[in-house]
Image (cartoon, coloured by chain):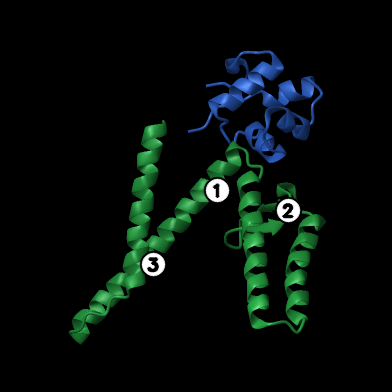
Amino acid sequence: MFAKPEWFKRRKYTGWGLTPATWQGWVYILFMIGVLIVFNSFDLSQGLRLGFNAFWIFIILIDLVDVLRNLKKDERDRIHEAIAERNAAWVMSFLLAMGLLYDLVLSALKQEFVVHPFLVIALFGGVVAKAFSNWKLGREN
Amino acid sequence: MGLEKNRLKEFRVKKGLSQKALGDKVGVSRQTIISIEQNRYVPSLPLALKLSKLFGCRVEDLFDV
């Protein structure tokens, strides 16, 4: 759409997403944020402000997905990304499982079932994502 | 598992290509070419075939097993 993939690079050391690779990337980010700030500085109705903010954030998200999809990656980048994502998934799964275990131990001690549903949903979501990925990969190659 | 050694740098220099130019020709980054030349990265079969086609040699001339 508006942003070009060559303006950005994949965030490697500070989480997920994109980081600007060129000055055009920085200008794009400043412009997108600037429009939001300028629009919100006007004395407008709550409805109009909310509508515009939602529309603009939607545009930013669409653009972000478009850049992520078209970001130039070669086979070595893909392997590095896959290994890094797998390791991140392992650490997150381990910590979620520890959280679940903590809740279960606490529940036993308190004689009251207090397991945070998000822990269970996140772990179950991971299981579903893994199963789907394996099923899809198995069908494709 | 890595390959014993490769002659990518030798072939590249003989053809008068920079690492960036070679990367652009076969669709990978300069960093990937550096890693292959330093035996730190084993290229995929399609990439090895592209390289051998570009240099007009057999894959086994480029990569030793």
Circle 1: residue type: Glu
Label 3 marks a residue whose chain is A
Q: Secondary structure at mark 2?
A: loop
Comes first in the chain, label 3 or label 1: 1
Quick one: which chain is green? A
Number of residue marks: 3
Q: What x and y, as percent, mark residue B38?
A: 65, 35
Q: Quick check: do tags 2 and 3 share a chain?
A: yes
Label 2 marks a residue whose chain is A
Residue A118's quadrant in the figure? bottom left
**Residue bearing mark 1:** A81
Instruction: Find out whether the residues at labels 2 and 1 contact each other: C-beta distance under 8 Å.
Output: no
Q: What x and y, as percent, mark residue B40?
A: 59, 37
Circle 3: residue type: Leu
Q: Secondary structure at mark 1?
A: helix
Label 1 marks a residue whose chain is A
